[in-house]
Amino acid sequence: MTAFSLDPEQTAWCTELRTLAEERLRPLAEKGEPGRVNRPLVAALGELGLLDRLFAGEGAGGPAAEQGALGLCLLRESLAYACTEAETALALQGLGAHPVAAYGSARQREQWLAPARAGRAVAAFALSEPGAGSDAAALALRAEPDGVSSWRLTGEKCWISNAPEADFYTVFARTTPGAGARGVTAFLVPADRAGLTGTHLDMLSPHPIGALAFDGVRVTGDDMLGEPDRGFRVAMTTLNRFRPSVGAFAVGMAAAALDATLAHTAQRDAFGAKLKDLQAVAHQVAEMATRTEAARLMVHAAAAAYDRGEPDIARRAAMAKLIATETAQYVVDAAVQLHGARALQRGHLLEHLYREVRAPRIYEGASEVQRTIIARELYSAEADGAQPATSQPATPESATPESATPESATPEEPSA
């Protein structure tokens, strides 16, 4: 793979994924209840081996085309093109279960990661709170000591995808008051733990999402993910891995809207000609295609850089998510405009995409947060006397220190 193209194996895999999503996953998605976890769809993702792709490089195996962050981007873009519901279900499993794969004990991985990868257990990533979204270092969920190596969780989480129907949650709680990002610990909390309750939230685009209430929920050292007071690293490592692939999800929606527009304008008559023959329309379509391709290239480049362990992972991932989600909003809106009233009818592909495309500009770091990250990284490099691209190589984990500023934190609001 080069910085500007995919190899034949990768291209073939994307085509295979689109077909699989259209033929096997979309029928299951259409049978699901809007706003609720679609367990048959999650199970199908597991049976087809697609959930394993979320953890490529961590014992998943498979062809090279499917490996790493780039493979994840190709997977999410292809699923989003054909079935956004399947993409959503897959991405949420990844967010909730990746901390277990990366930081969990052998017991935790056996008990929870294995069934999550198989689609038998639904995972959730519980970071955001009513008063802590983009500033995730301001978490207020308290983990108060309760004996030796045990705590009681008290507080709330909000905008948690798959809540309250998940089987387990990766929960971030404050173990050291007043310590900012350095005082947060990650815990794996089973959904049936005493004192944990939840409610559904009704969103613009129906998604499984809700709020959680913790009333003295007991956790122990066996429930911890990673080290005490270093949960912020767990969160940031997970988000940095998935952030470029949020851009891939957006690119998939943009590509679907673009292809629908090409087909429509090629056959629609207006003013004595096909819509495509009107210069204003042709120029609009050209702009949509150019922006979509530019966004795709930035997403692929960011993912490839992550896989190679290159420096500036945070900056690259932020740029990829920013341009891709903003581009998708533009492309889908332009597609609606060129389709006219039919695109506003309930059930039309573009009506669906128009509702779906809005949330990615907010979750896992709003566009404003991404711009803050980009600017901070650029000025930091300038202060060090080096451009970001010429910094010394770093592992993905070293690009996400627990001492990161609050702006680098991002909310886990409705994914997909």
Image (spheres, rainbow, N blue to C red):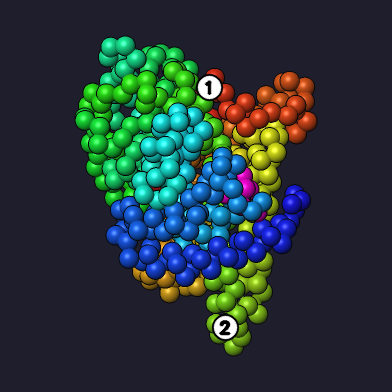
CA gap, disc 1 and disc 2: 55 Å
Q: Secondary structure at mark 2?
A: helix
Residue at (50, 55) in percent of width and height: 49
Start-end of magenta stretch: 65-72
Tell me if residue 245 can be seen.
no
Residue 67 is a magenta residue: yes
Q: Is residue 192 above or below residue 272?
A: above
**Chief secondary structure of the magenta portion:** helix
> Which quadrant holds residue 376?
top right
Q: Position of residue 48 (x, y in %)?
A: 48, 58
Compared to 109, does 175 lie above or below?
above
Q: Which residue is mark 1?
A: 402
State yes or no: discs 1 and 2 in contact (Cβ < 8 Å). Answer: no
Q: Is residue 81 left or right of residue 351?
A: right
Would residue 202 be visible to someone looking at this image?
A: yes
Q: Nearer the viewer, mark 1 or mark 2?
A: 1
Q: Which mark is residue 267?
A: 2
Residue 348 in which image quadrant: bottom left
Residue type pointed to by label 2: Gln
- Residue located farthest toward the top when viewing the structure as drawn: 148
Residue 243 picture location, percent across and down: 55, 42
Q: Residues within 10 Å of mark 2 (few under 14, many from 20)?
A: few
- Numbered circles on residues, count: 2
